[in-house]
Amino acid sequence: MSEDSKERLFAALDLFREKVNENARLRQMNRDWNRDIAVVVKDLPGVDAAISMREGQMDWRPEAASDPNIVLTAPADVLIGIFRGESTPTEPYLDGSLTLRGSQEDVLRLDFVSLMLWGE
């Protein structure tokens, strides 16, 4: 199961990267928002991802992020749902299955990225 979840998570991150990078409004809005984001998968130890936002473009690597500005921690299924646009971050955040660590401004910006891509 963990290998399947890992592959599904990485596919969801690929989709998220594609959608972020093809959205002209997001690229313009984030042109000066350069951040490193750690994705920590609670139920898959050792499976992490590092997202980088640079000059409006997003990329990710299958490795732990060093010195991230934002840390997202959740079970694989929650992260997959968020990165695929099947759920918003709000409900998992409110029920405690998703934790976000970072500045208020960065967390709000990340939430807005999700909202612009997938809507409510």
Image (tube, rainbow, N blue to C red):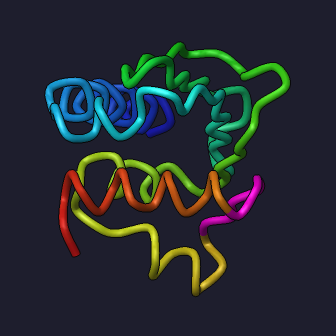
Q: Quadrant of the C terminus?
A: bottom left
Residue 116 rendering spot, x and y as whole percentages:
24, 56
Q: Residue furthest bottom?
A: 95
Q: Residue at x 29, y 63 (%)?
A: 115
The spot of residue 25 in percent (x, y) is 20, 40
Q: Is residue 84 left or right of residue 3?
A: left
- Check the picture and name the quadrant holding the N terminus: top left
23, 6: nearer the viewer: 23
In this picture, is 56 found above or below 38? Answer: above
Q: Quadrant of the rendered structure where residue 28 is?
A: top left
Across and down, in percent, residue 65 comes to: 73, 22
Q: What residue is rendered at 22% in x and 31% in y? A: 15
Residue found at the very far right of the displayed protein: 67
Quarter-wise, where is residue 114 in the image?
bottom left
Membership of 99 in magenta stretch: yes
Point 41% across, 35% down: residue: 30
Look at the image and give the residue range highlighted in magenta.
98-104
